[in-house]
Image (cartoon, rainbow, N blue to C red):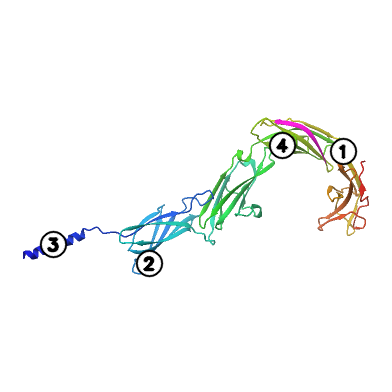
Amino acid sequence: MLCAALFMLVFAGCSNSMDLSPKIETGVKITITSDINGARTAYPTQPVFTKYALELTGEWAWQDDEKEYTLTNGQTSITIPLTPGKWNIKVTGFTKIKDTEYAAAEGERTVTVTKNGIVPASINISAIQNYTQHGFLSFSATYPEEAVSKAELYIYHVGNNYYDYRPYGELTDEEYTPLVRFEIEPAYYMLTLLLDVKDSLGNYYRTVAWNEVIHIYSGMETSVEKTFTEDDLNRFITVGGPLNVTVNGDVPDEVYVRLYRDVNYEDSVGFAYSTTDTWQTSIPVVLNTPVVFYLIVEAKYEGISFLDKCGSVTVNNADINNHAINVTFSGTETITLSGTADVKINNVAAEEVWIAAYLASDVEIRRIQVLSDDGSWQMLLPLRHIGATVSFHVIAIDRGKGYDLSKPAYPEHCPLKIPALILLKISQR
């Protein structure tokens, strides 16, 4: 009886010892990483994922059924109990754009779960480049509106030229909103922004171009923002004053005042165009003052250009509005050619007639329109053409009927004839 009782006690003790042994949990601890980052090539911004969907599939039928889990609220790690064996783990990252969720990145890995405990598994997900699923580009640009007359945005494939494409949008359009979102096929793109910059007079000065390489992912949004300051676009000062220019005692048709940085008149900094008695232009603010700019006046009168040097102007980065220019050009600096023109198209007087003068080398040196009712015309040439042999072409135009004809003015061309000397030695008159 004692032996039986002792046996039962030992057996019970053994049983209690087995219950107290720690139970080993088996499974996998998954940590999700992404290769999408904020490199200077414009990528989707972080964080991009609203949730992660996990699918775990065992190698053998006797393993647990397929398991599915979802991580939200920025969670990127989870520990999942699994039976020993090989498991395939697939992770899909989702983004939400305009209230719609997109599967944007994915990755998978096979791990072996053992009886020894939890197996760590880091799974890297990469962007899904599914060309049937578009990505998104959000673009925003700010700049001094008073300095920009036009801003155009181009988006095109890397390796191409922006001018082969139509602009995606004109930022200066009244319907443009500060933040624009475009839906685009996934790929690498070049983004070009062209800003037409105005000077202080409101005239076009130059175009500033800004480029950025962007990477569009399926179902993801890439954001690009750019801010321009006045210094980025150039600050300007105004230079001008009274203008008194005559040719043969007459006011010319138009006058250009050109500014140069050097006495050889090779490095141009800008010009003023005038048909009045004043001239004015804008130039960028210079770093080191004072700066001397050298001036040339060009007057155009009856199609002839007259040029003359007219001193200099000293700039101290302050507006100048009293620099007077007075230049007189003499009539002895021109040659006058004249004649009459009787030009017909199919025996009907041409609606519009032009006479063009050419040197023997077929270089056009002058073109005038015949405006008189009797067909008379007059042409001025610079003195440098004295002694040259010239020939004429007549251009007959009828815009309503689509005619635009140009012929050498020789007598055998009966529909286009000029009863005037065709080849001549030029002499001054």
Residue 174 visible in this rendered orientation of the protein = no
Amino acid type, label 1:
Glu
Q: Quadrant of the N terminus?
A: bottom left
Name the N-terminal-most of marks 1 and 3.
3
Amino acid type, label 4:
Thr
Residue 179: % across, % down: 56, 48
Residue position for label 4 = 281
Q: Which mark is residue 407?
A: none
Q: Which residues are magenta?
A: 305-314
Residue position for label 2 = 59
Q: Does 133 sit left or right of 269 as displayed?
A: left
Amino acid type, label 2:
Glu
Residue position for label 1 = 333
Queried whether the magenta region covers residue 182, the answer comes back as no
Residue 399: % across, % down: 81, 55
Q: Secondary structure at mark 1?
A: helix
Q: Secondary structure at mark 2?
A: loop
Q: Are marks 2 and 4 in contact (CB under 8 Å)?
A: no
Amino acid type, label 3:
Val
**In the rendered image of this protein, does residue 384 appear above or below residue 392?**
above
Residue position for label 3 = 10
